[in-house]
Image (cartoon, coloured by chain):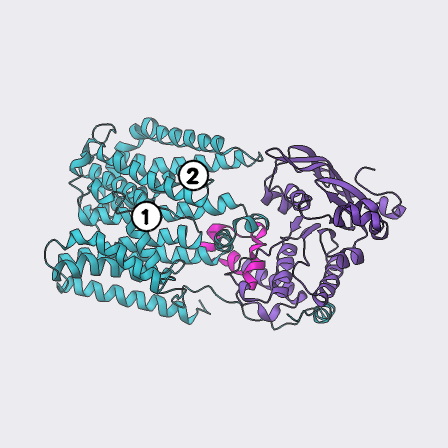
Chain colours: A cyan, B purple
Amino acid sequence: MKNIKKSTLTFFGAMLAIYIIVQLLLSLGVLNNFWRGIIFWGAAISIVALGLNLIYGFNGQFSLGQYGFYALGAYAAADVTWRWLNEDPSGIVVGFLGSAVVLGLYALVAVFLRRFYNVRVTTRFLAYLLTTVLGYGIAVIGLRPLLEPLLLTVLNALPPAVTQQIVFFLALVSGAAIAGIASFLFGIPVLSLGSDYFGIATLGFTIIVKVLLDNTDTILPFPEMKGARGMVGIPQWTTWTWVFLCFLLVVVVMRNLLHSSTGRAILSVREDERAAELVGIDVTQAKLLPFVVGSVFAGLAGGIRAHDLAFLHPQSFNFIQSFNPLIIVVFGGLGSMTGTMITGFLWILLLEGALRLFLPQGFETWRFVVYPLVLLIMMLLRPEGLFGQYEFPYLKRPLANLRTRSASPQAGEAAASEEVTP
Amino acid sequence: MKGRPEGLPTEVEARPALLEIEGLTQFFDNLRAVHNFDLTLRQGELIGLIGPNGAGKTTVFNLITGVYQPSEGSIRFRGMELLGIPSHEIIQLGIARTFQNIRLFSKLTVLDNVRIAYHPHAGYTLFDGIVRNKAYREQEDYLTERAQEFLAIFGLEQRQNDIAGSLPYGLQRRLEIARALATDPELLILDEPAAGMNPQEIDALMELIRFIRQQFNLTILLVEHRMRLVMNICEWITVMDFGEVIARGVPAAVRDNLLVVEAYLGRQTAFLK
């Protein structure tokens, strides 16, 4: 490997250093469980906020649905591991393999739909909805009896530590995949609305998810989630390594996505949707993709958080909470990954960590008075966010070097002769 | 032949038709913005569409590029019916346009503005972009180089890393045309390209239009108010008023057409003239 840029080396070096330092502090016991929770939580919130920044900051779609996908990911991942601990691998079969089946079927449906121009939104939505039902139906009816005994034998034959890591990995992937599939289905009809309506619809989504979670044991067939009483019995499997790897993965994927041609299409939609359409960008796709990717990030963060907290309660995903990532994104700077990452950590560190220790009891009640005020002051003093357009060199959009080879002489002359003096 | 003036040179009439619009009608609620509009463009022509404000010129452009779906009529491009095809696919078929009020991606760099137009033919997948494999690197280098060559043609090479919104007005116009051409069109539609320009800038623009037409082998349809530009470069002109075609012909004929003068200046003045 040659030609690795200095900024890349610096970034990964710094990340590695942070990993080692935190790992050391954790194993030496300098950071107790409280601070460990704060760090993990900060990472999870940062991932959620990065996803939202992709949707709102880079693509220009104002969304309040991020916490709904976070909740979906958390509950889905928790359910997979909970079931596994109760000798039931159905979570893995349905959550992981079922999602894989659904994604495979989506690819077929997409190829099929591409043969028609102007498929109506409702038709498209119904096609994918039926596909989803079919995919998970296949998993529940067909795959479960087939694969469950096999999975049990194989996974139990491995050393327990290895099995645990595999199951945890599958659970995280299941959570992320289910959040992604939900956002895809939700995004098809809703993204065709204008931006404000989209914001309201996503708020509605968060509320729907919260209400469903309140009733998981009554109207949904998930008695282990225990509805409004909160889900218990989730193993505390999240380790610093998992948190770090997920965080790094999200940052690198998002950065590479944004710097690719697709990333430019995503940005163009934010700048001017009509103009993007009229240079040949498929705007529907360029909105759906960041929405799904952002939600997958949220789902992944949900899995991490669930397996750190070991307890899930619908109340922690209510719609007031759904403003948290929004505040972080606006605070850190719309369209600044660096800003979102740092603000996400600071947010938890200060508001949930430091302030809880140093301020008297009952401060929590005042938080919802303080947040809007701080945000208001922020908007007045520094509307571009704490970091504005600043990015770490590694995350910055690369600028192309000037061409050394000169253009063909004829074209150069023509250009010179019509130089406009403004 | 529908949608063409009489008496054009026979060698022009022998060329194949590129764009054929027939009986195009568009209602906005009860307002008839365009009525029974015909226009046929042959390959390599440069044609002007003029008319007073509100005559329906921009509506015609929006209908061609699929922004609106027409109430009646048909639009064929290279013999292919465009009705019902979404805008971005019409662009990919080979029609490009600019806007009356410049619509650049103003917070992105000049280079990115052009590279965005390459996206439908980027030549690598989303996955390639995320894992940054060889396909991504090669194709991205190629796209960048192509965009830079393009910018060089338009004299914007030195400005490639500037933010598009920070360019002076004349250069923004130029960049918008460059971005439209980057989609590799056969037909270029210019919506009032000279709006807000002074006479020198208009001269430069005429030069530019002639140059790109030859360089990229384009057929051009333009809407314009500035007679200086229209009369100078268009081969023939269609005049619209209240959504209907009131005259067609070579610039000299249109200039002397009483109906046209009336539409622009009012009946009284036309009579005096």
Image position, residue B248 (x, y; %): 81, 44
Q: Nearer the viewer, mark 2 or mark 1?
A: 2
Horizontal side, residue B261 vs residue A41: left or right: right
- The residue that disc 2 covers is A190
The chain to which mark 2 is attached is A
Q: Which quarter of the picture shows residue B182?
A: bottom right
What residue occupies the far top of the structure in this picture? A141
**Dot 2 surroundings within 10 Å: few (below 14), some, or many (20 or more)?**
many
**Dot 1 surroundings within 10 Å: few (below 14), some, or many (20 or more)?**
many
Q: From this viewpoint, is residue A276 visible?
A: yes
Image position, residue B32 (x, y; %): 66, 36
Marks 2 and 1 in Cβ contact (< 8 Å):
no
- Residue A75 is covered by the magenta coloring: no
Q: Indicate the secondary structure of the residue bearing disc 1.
A: helix
Considering only order in the chain, which callout, 1 or 2, is on the residue closer to the N terminus? 2
Quadrant where the N terminus of chain A lies? bottom left
- Residue B113 is covered by the magenta coloring: yes
Instruction: Say whether mark 1 and mark 2 are on the same chain.
Output: yes
Q: Which amino acid does label 1 sit on?
A: Ala
Give the Cα distance between marks 2 and 1: 19 Å
Image position, residue A262 (x, y; %): 50, 52
Label ID, residue A298: 1
Is the stretch drawn in magenta largely helix, strand or loop?
helix
Q: Which quarter of the picture shows residue A215?
A: top left
A401 or A281, nearer to the observer: A281
| Highlighted range, magenta | B110-138
Q: Which amino acid does label 2 sit on?
A: Val
Which residue is rendered at x = 19% and y = 42% of the image? Answer: A312
Which residue is rendered at x = 10% and y = 55% of the image? Answer: A361
Q: Indicate the secondary structure of the residue bearing disc 2.
A: helix
A218 or B33, nearer to the observer: B33
